[in-house]
Image (cartoon, rainbow, N blue to C red):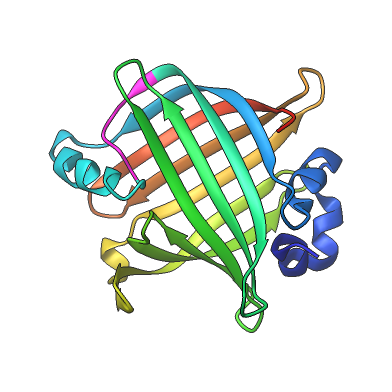
Amino acid sequence: MTIYQNLLGEEFHKLHPKLQARYALPIDVPFFAIGMMSKIETGARWLTPFLKFASNWKFLFPENGQDVPFTIKNTCKLLPNGEVEVYWERTFYFKERTRCFNACMSIDTKRKVVKDYLGEPSLLYSDLTFDVTKEGRLLIRSGFQSVVIGEFEVPIPRVLEGRVIVEEGYDEVRELFSIHVFIHNPIIGKVMAYAGEFKEQSF
């Protein structure tokens, strides 16, 4: 059973069937898709140095754009300690450079959250909660966050967090998955936002 099925329980079956298939993720059988981001936007210009710094860890990045091709690959792995982990690889093909946004997710069954380690190697940790909308879309929100420094994690004050909202759905008419991501901070506003569509491909 995938970490997402485990986390959502009966709610998992309320997802659109295509989303259920997408998040079933058998061990070592990747989900791979190709798509187009209709828009990618970052926040205030003074954030650019931070976003450039984060890009060195395959995390956030400073580029903006419209109609940006991208790929997404999710691979479920069984770790030596018996824990199940999902490796996320998101690649954005801007005209002048390629950017990656990678992460590793596992589950905390006691707290009922997904543990999301962002970047490669990990630069930021975030709790994620998963919910299903009445339309059968997947809604993801961030919670507690910390900065990862080697083996140590330093909690980030709530007021400084980059709060994340993700909504993923499926368009039956066009046979495409849709994705909307918004990252913001209560003080500085938008950090990054992107929206697009993608279609599963054989891998």
Q: Is residue 110 left or right of residue 53?
A: right
Q: Looking at this view, is 187 or 128 the one in front?
A: 128
Chain part drawn in magenta: 60-65
Residue at image location 74% in from the left, 32% down from the top: 170
Q: Quadrant of residue 45?
A: top left
Q: In the image as oriented, which residue stretches furthest toward the bottom?
A: 110
42 versus 157 height, above or below: above
- Residue 87 picture location, percent across and down: 57, 54
- Residue 185 on the magenta segment: no
- The N terminus, quarter of image: bottom right
Q: Looking at this view, is 158 or 76 the one in front?
A: 76
Q: Quadrant of residue 118?
A: bottom left
Residue at image location 79% in from the left, 53% down from the top: 24
Residue at image location 76% in from the left, 18% down from the top: 174
- The C terminus, quarter of image: top right
- Residue 34 picture location, percent across and down: 61, 26
25 versus 91 height, above or below: below
Q: Main secondary structure of the magenta part?
A: loop
